[in-house]
Each structure stands twice: as structure tokens, then as C-alpha cells.
Amino acid sequence: MEIMLSNPAAPQLGAMREQLDTPALLLDLDRFERNSARLASGIQRGGVAWRPHTKAHKSPFLAARQIELGAIGVTCAKVGEAEVMVENGIRSVLVANEVASGPKLDRIARLQDRAEVFACADDPYHVELAAAAGLAAGVEIPLLVEIDVGMHRAGVAPGAPARDLARLIDRSRGVRFAGLMAYEGHVLTLWPATVKEAAAREAIGLLVDTRRLVERDGIPVDIVSGGGSGSYTATAQIAGMTEIQAGGACLMDLFYADECHLAEEGYEFALTVLAMVTSRPTSDRAIIDAGFKALSARDDVPPRPVGLPDVTVTTLSAEHGYLELGPGAPDLQIGQRVELIPDYSDTTTFRHDQFVGLRDGRVERVIPLLARGRLS
Amino acid sequence: MEIMLSNPAAPQLGAMREQLDTPALLLDLDRFERNSARLASGIQRGGVAWRPHTKAHKSPFLAARQIELGAIGVTCAKVGEAEVMVENGIRSVLVANEVASGPKLDRIARLQDRAEVFACADDPYHVELAAAAGLAAGVEIPLLVEIDVGMHRAGVAPGAPARDLARLIDRSRGVRFAGLMAYEGHVLTLWPATVKEAAAREAIGLLVDTRRLVERDGIPVDIVSGGGSGSYTATAQIAGMTEIQAGGACLMDLFYADECHLAEEGYEFALTVLAMVTSRPTSDRAIIDAGFKALSARDDVPPRPVGLPDVTVTTLSAEHGYLELGPGAPDLQIGQRVELIPDYSDTTTFRHDQFVGLRDGRVERVIPLLARGRLS
């Protein structure tokens, strides 16, 4: 059986937005770059380094652009994503998760000759596995201790438990203690700003207090990492932090705009999905060719059509989106293109193989999500 | 910039389930084949042909297996999926959607020399566009008229409006009237069986009545297509149907088992996601390495761990799944593998690039979802 890799639907460079086949994941490159520069400067104002999380864009090309704009490296979720980044020239990668399998840690060890690739630990199990992989490969795997500062996902308790884990790493061969990490994901949507800032200070306080506890042992803490797009304005200002992982604001979406209040900070919607009306069965219903395989939607936050008043996405089935046309809606025609702002970039991008990178409404570059599908 | 395509995490043939890296999309091949044979025979009992929808598996290899087990061809959602199927040897493909762009219809026209590739219309717009594409390529594009029989998605109204569209196709050059299609998706979850059957008869009655109306014009109706996995037991028995598109039951999931009552028909869970415990921060919480990029979950239907009593998936973030361990739960260890039955196959499979095809618990074949990402 032959394997087909050519794609007759691939967009042409120079094509206009109005000529693109649908559905397509669009990235406005000017906006992406302005958002990235804004995020970089906002973080660096606090004297802190920027290590953007690439889990939504999954692209070494966009990662390299972020590094040109000030990032010191990138954050990834998975070892497979780190491999794609390193293979494509990124020299510093934090895998911001516990890695709990020997084969995965062997892969991290093998990457060390071309890049600095950090992983996290919240249990002696991870340290022992990483030490074995490092020793076998003749390298030291740099490990951060992840601390639970209130999100209650992964992470060891702050204070003595985290300090004890740092000690274990520090005295183990095959690994190197590189610092501490936490994610204050539970504060992102708090509001007003004063409430969010207080919660961020409380959460990150546990992280930087632990830093001091570890340093009191004489163990240097080079990296103290954390911070999302919804919290960096507070977190990047807290003394003791060394780097911020926020990356989502470079793409922007309704979650960051409305629930994290980033529209008020000047971030622009760089990411959209282009769809086409394929059916107009009734006067109040239009069907588009983007369903849940091209778009995501939370119950109360559907994707938002651009420039189409009184048009609402009501349902997504696999390949169909239902648009409800209110009294003030335009009379959408079959064949008409509809551009939608995603509810959340991180639940949208991985449904696609590529961004269509636009500048001034024309295709400048097709950007594959090279690390898409690298789930392990 | 170099593009990395090798994948160090690729599973080895012959590996045991317990050796697989995670997360991984597992397909039990024996179960897939038994489900497929059961579905084929259930449909063919009514003298009706089986044209399974491939939107969840997206694999020409699995499509070919279904054809060996009795299917006459396959159903696809997108032109890009049809291209992958045809390029890989499938000779009859129904694109069960309206196609509303000229370039897409050109692509369908180009496929006609290697396969019969049908598309749908519910408006003269589609017919005119298809006719232009067919004429330009010197072929006749076979078109089905899609009828709305109560799901209220796409589709022209049954009766005279559908008949008029069939007439338009019949007299247009560059296209050929091939039949009628409807999807009774609104009846799948009705219960008890008598209620579902009555609703299916009512919906499909509109379809087969329209068939007679078109035939009264002297226009032959070769194909009358419809039916999902949740409705085929009723729909395949209705006189006037010629083919059934049900395909999801071959994979099975919690939706088909519990809401469509297919477990009672003997279908087995062929599709699972394998994950690993990466953190055990508290006695009642375990974190696995599969979040919403590897698994889907509806609010009230999380994926179900296999063989782990009192263990519940409570939340999925991007790459983390939260397991709540009740009093009767086993003491899950970091590094331990957890197998989960998806809530819905169609929202699960496209998150992965490949099925790991197992037989007797060993990797027999890695099956890429070749049509994954062919959204247009």
C-alpha cells in the first residue's frame, strides 16, 4: 500500500486570505511578533528571563522567532516536543513536567550533547530514573524540582519536602540540580487585578521561600521558573524568580482576552480559523466546514466570528459548525469565508498540521506544527 | 532549518503492551475485526450494503480491512480524506458533505479516473460548482442530494425541494445524479429501542418517500444512504435504503456503549489510550501523562480506566490527566501504566498520529491515521 504524503490543498505562498481553502489555521505574523515583543518586554522589565511555553504553537520556526525577540530558550510539555525543538536548532529547552519512564529519560540524556534540556522531578522515583539514564549516557541530566504552590496538580510540597528532593538530586550522580519550578495556574482567571496579584504573590512566595531554604543548604538555585500568560504581570515582578514560561499570549484567544484580561494589556488576536459556509438550509442557520476537528469550544465560550454581528457558533459536530443568524446578522452565502477567533489556542492548534502565516493578508509562509503529535 | 521527521518514541513491532511508551492510542485488532464483522452482518441482513464512515479511524489500511469484511467502499467527511483513501487503493468513496468550493470540486473531479468519488449537494450552488468542475475535467461528478430528515444540520427539505434538486443535477452536464442521502443523527441516543426505532422509521421515511418522488420523474435513484452506528439496527431494515454509513461501532467507546446501547449488541471496546502515572502528589490524587491532547472528555463522561476500581478521571489539562483515587482504589505507583476507554472515539483518535495495533497484547502493526489533518 502506497503512502500518500502530497497534499493538493496546501496553500500557495502569496495567496490572499480570500483565496485560501478551508478550514485553515491562520496566524497573523505581525500580530504574533508584536504580542511576542510585548510579552518579552513585560517580563524582562522585572529583570527576569523569558522562556516561552511552545505547547500551543509546537513550531521550532516560531520558537526561533521568539528567541530573536528576546527569549532565552523554550518550554515544552513532552520529551518528543523537546526532540523536535533541539533537532531544529533550539539550544535550551525545559520539559516542564515530570518524566517517569526510563526510555524517555534516555532520550533526554541523548539530547544533552546538542542542547541543555531540563526535566522536572517531584519524587525520588524521577531522580533515580534520571540518574540511571544520565550515568548510562555519561551525562548529567539537569533537573528542576517542581513544587505545588496551590494548583494541586503535580509537584512536591514546598519547604522541607522540596528541599529534601533538591538535596537528593544534588548528591546523585548522572543528574544535576538546576533549580525549582512551579505553575500558579490557579490564579490566572482571578479578578480584579489586585486579587490576582495577591494570589500570585502568595503562590510564588512558596516557591521563592523554598529557594532560600535550598540555598541555606549551600545548594545553588540557578533557575526559578514559573508563570503563565494570565499571571506573568504579577509573577515576573516577584524577587527570586529567574524566568517566566508564559507563551500563550503570543497567539491570544478568547480565554486570554476575556478571562485573563490580556486584551486590556494590548495583546491582539493573532490566531484565527478560516472556514467556509457550505450550507444555508434555513434563514437563521448556516453550516460551516469547521467542526470539532478544526475548532474547540467550551460550553459557554464558542469561537467568535470576526466582523459578523449577531452570528453565533452554537454547535460543533465533527466537521460541521452551526452558525445561528440573529435578526442583525448578514445574509451569509454558501461559499463565503468566515474567520473565527478560537476560544482557546491550546485546544485549537493541535487539530491542525500547519499555520498559514499571513502578513498584510497574504500567505508569507506555511508553518508546520512540527511537534504536533509528539505526545510522549 | 532542518525538519525532523524521525520519532525515537515509535513503538517496536512485537513489543508487549506493558513495554509501550505513553501516551499511545491502542487498537485491539481482534476486537476491531469482530466489531467490523458484526456490523457488516447486521447491516447486510437487511439486504443493504455497508459503506463505513472512516472519520474516526482515518486509515486506508483499516478501510481495506473493512472492505475485506464486507464493505463496498467507505464514507469520508472531507475531500482530503477521500484523496488519501483513493491514493491508497480504495475504489469507492462517498464524501458525505456538501462541497462548496471550486478548488475542492476540481480535486474530486481529478479523483474520478481512479475511483468513484461521490459528493453531496443541498443547494443549486453546489450543483453548478460541481458541474463546472466536472466539465472542465471532462468527467461527471456523481452527486447525492442530502436531505434534512430531522437532525437540522445541513440538507434540503424532503419531498419537492429535494426532488427539484435531483432534477437539476439530472439535467446538468458535468455531474450525474447518483442518489439521496440523509443522516438521522438525532435518533441515536433515544431509548428504549422501540422509541428509537419509531423515530428512525419516521426520519428515514422522509428519505425513502423522496426516493419514490424522484423515481416518479423517471430519474433512477441508485443510492439511498444513511445510518449511524447508533441507529443502523433500525435503519438497515427499512425498505428503500441501499447502504448504511455506520462505522464507529468498529472502534467502540463509552458513547456507543452507554448512550447508543451497543454493548448490549455484543460490541467490544477496541480503542483505548495507554497512559502512565507520572506523579503521586497525594494519597487521593495521581497524575497521568495524558491530558486533552491525548484524550477527550465530556463533562459527565470522562474516559474510564480499565481494571482500576474506584479510580476516576476528574480533569484533563493539556498534558496532564488527574485521577481521583477513592477508598477502594489501588495504590497507583509512579511509572505504572493506565489504560483508558475513551468517552468518544471521534473526539479521541485525531489527537494521535497513529494507532498501535495490538493482537494478543503485542504490537502487530503501527497504523498511521493517514487522513488525519486533511481538514479541507
Image (cartoon, coloured by chain):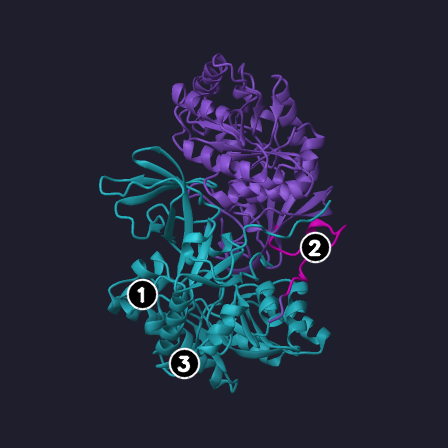
Chain colours: A purple, B cyan
Instruction: Tell me the CA gap for discs 1 and 2.
Output: 42 Å
Q: Chain of mark 3?
A: B
In space, the residues marked 3 and 1 are separated at their CA atoms by 20 Å
On the same chain, marks 2 and 3? The answer is no
Label whose residue precedes the other's in the sequence (3 or 1): 3
Query: What secondary structure is the stretch in magenta mostly built from?
Result: loop
Q: Can you identify the residue that label 1 sits on?
A: B262
In 3D space, how far apart are the residues under numbered discs 2 and 3 (Cα atoms)? 40 Å
- Judge the density around disc 2: few (<14), some (14-19), many (≥20) Cα neighbours within 10 Å: some
Between B195 and A152, the residue placed more toward the observer is: A152
Q: Residue at x 60, y 37 (%)?
A: A251
Q: Residue at x 48, y 59 (%)?
A: B356
Q: Residue furthest top?
A: A216
Magenta span: A4-24
Q: Nearer the viewer, mark 3 or mark 1?
A: 1
Q: Are marks 3 and 1 on the same chain?
A: yes
Which amino acid lies under the numbered mark 2 shown in the image of this protein?
Pro
Can residue B169 be seen in the rendering of this structure?
yes
Say if labels 1 and 2 share a chain.
Answer: no
Using the image, tell me which numbered label, if any, was put on residue B48: 3
The reply to whether the C-beta atoms of the residues labelled 1 and 2 are less than 8 Å apart is no
Farthest bottom residue? B218
Residue A83 horizontal side relative to residue A158, left or right = right
Tell me: residue A322, above or below residue A85.
below
